[in-house]
Image (tube, rainbow, N blue to C red):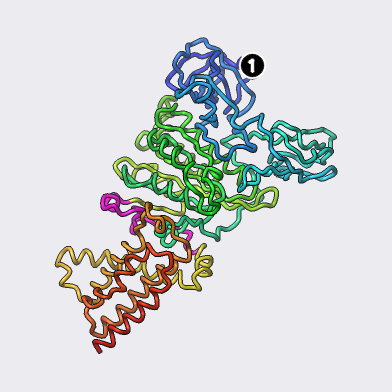
Amino acid sequence: MQKRIIGQIKRVNGPVVTAKNVVDAKMMELVYLSDAHLIGEVVKLNGSQATVQVYEDVTGLTPGDNIYGSNNPLSVELGPGLIGSIYDGIQRPLEQLKVLSGDFIDRGISASPISHIKEWEYEPVCKEGDVITGGSILGKVKENDNITHLIMASPNTEEMTVTFSEKAGNYNVDKVVVKAVDVHKNEKSFTMVQHWPIRTPRPVKDRKPLKNPLITGQRVIDTLFPLSKGGTVAIPGGFGTGKTMTQHSIASWCDADIIIYIGCGERGNEMTEVLREFPTLIDPRTGRSLMERTVLIANTSNMPVSAREASIYTGISMAEYYRDMGYHIAIMADSTSRWAEALRELGGRMEEMPAEEGFPAYLPTRIAEFYERAGLMNNLNDTVGSVSVIGAVSPPGGDFSEPVTQHTKRFVRCFWGLDKGLASARHYPAISWLNSYSEYTDEVKDWWDDKSNGSWTIDRQKIMELLQKEVRLQQVVKLVGPDALPDSQNFILEVCNVFKIAFLQQNAFDEIDKYCPVEKQVKMLHIIVMYYELGSNIIKNGVTLVKVRRLKVVQDIIKMKYLEDVSPLEARLERSMKHLEAIYE
């Protein structure tokens, strides 16, 4: 560690420290406070004074203690070994910290985020004489059976010519694998490790249009409110509505290559559940542990509040790194409200002018900066990768009009609003079909129509229209009762009820229903729309709604989510309706 004194502590106000006699300090520089070497970051400079945001417990700091500079911004260490790891908000490996300090993290303790001892089987890609630039692929490492880790030149590398490329073999991450010279004959050595400032987005060539959906296996999401790969979505909901469990389900079943789960200020018992469950979950695509494509960042509510603020950036910087390799990444941020609360507390301690509900005036800017780092990108090395951001929002009292929810809605294109009434009725996922929306529907419809022979767009539009009609009819029913409606309108209520039970409601504990493949979703949707169309026709021809309800096939439709193959139901439904109509002609 470089011992460069840049000032002394003047005042300690929780995680915000004021420094005096400041010389040669830089904005956003990583610093170490006192001889305990607590990690901090310079967030404000004012003449000979500076404000430092501390990422550890500040107990024991005293005025006059030295502050040491590092000449570097707060960065993540990137290289083989990230997958399967569990970090805190500033990328300290929690499993290593437990070995060093036990169940509670000691102040000033640190450990390398990735192993510098473990050897990896390295395979060179570039050779002597090749020209490389930022993002160029230098070699490959098999991180596990599912993830091939590309060793890349740092994105800010200028054009250079390779003078040395290490042969294939087993090396640790500090091994120099490539040497290159620039036009001025300055030599640079490349290892398997690179560092990147967490608050700076990694550069790309350009953004690509979003066309393919992120398949989650949750019918209400995939069919009604789809999310594109590279898209952004907010999941707001009050306490107990299932934000965390929805994210767990998506993390377990979505078709992203890599999952990064950020527990940002969540309760310790919830993070404990994640840490215990994920290693035991089996990836449905590979049949192996889900941790072989997962990185966990655990920053619970009792950890330092400033580290909670940094955890979001730590996670998305790692996501961008794997995106540059051509992978599709899904980030679960649980929850951005706790992150915003950290900004509010830190802003208050720095005596900044508060805006609505005490949040800092720059809250919308910070939210926008975070979600803007999502996208489907054409990378510097011509690979194509994506980062999809799924952010949970915890509005106090379930009030969606509070600032974090409202500002988040401005910057995301998909909104899965959770409903307290649905959660109380044990309807999960408790995503409201009335308050939710997706602006990606038009972008992914070609993909879905290709999977459904053109029926998805028509069937989805039909069922959404029926759900809107149901709202108006329910208002009439509350006033005058269902008997006042004709059978044709009562049948709309019947179909919507079947749709909610058979399609929207999903049982996470059932081996078949916990994940619904695309092909099955398409068929289930089509069967319910077909039930409405056939039933409407025979009711117009004089058949009563009571007779339609008594058809055995209707009960089979309600239970079809527990079947692996629902195809036979389509033909049975058509036969039953024709038979019923023939009887009453």
Say whether residue 304 is left or right of residue 50.
Answer: left
The residue nearer to you, when weighing 267 against 356, is: 267
Indicate whether residue 432 is drawn in magenta: yes
Q: In what quadrant of the picture does the N terminus appear?
A: top right
When the figure is inspected, residue 555 is found, relative to residue 376, above or below; the finding is below
- Residue 2 in the magenta stretch? The answer is no
Which residue is at the front of the view, 149 or 484?
A: 149
Residue sitting at x 40%, y 31%: 301
Residue that badge 1 annotates: 4
Q: Position of residue 73 (x, y in %)?
A: 60, 29
Report x, y in % for residue 399: 31, 45
How many neighbours does mark 1 have within 10 angstroms: few (below 14), some (14-19), or many (20 or more)? some
Relative vertical location of residue 237 with respect to residue 55 in this rendering, above or below: below
At x 54%, y 54%, the residue is 285
Q: Position of residue 376 (x, y in %)?
A: 58, 53
Q: Closest to the observer: 135 or 370?
A: 135
Q: Position of residue 65 (x, y in %)?
A: 53, 11
Q: Amino acid at mark 1?
A: Arg
Q: Residue at x 31, y 54 (%)?
A: 427
Q: Which residues are magenta?
A: 419-442
Q: Quadrant of residue 117?
A: top right
Determine whether 243 is above or below 164 in the image. Answer: below
In this figure, what is the number of numbered marks?
Answer: 1
Query: Which residue of the protein is positioned furthest toward the bottom in this rendering?
Result: 585
Residue 126 visible in the displayed image: yes
Q: Is residue 407 left or right of residue 178?
A: left
Query: In the picture shown, does residue 268 fall above or below 560?
Result: above
Judge whether residue 336 can be spotted in this image: no
Secondary structure that dominates the magenta span: loop
The residue located at (34%, 53%) in the rendering is: 428
Q: Locate residue 300: give its quadrant.
A: top left
Q: Secondary structure at mark 1?
A: strand
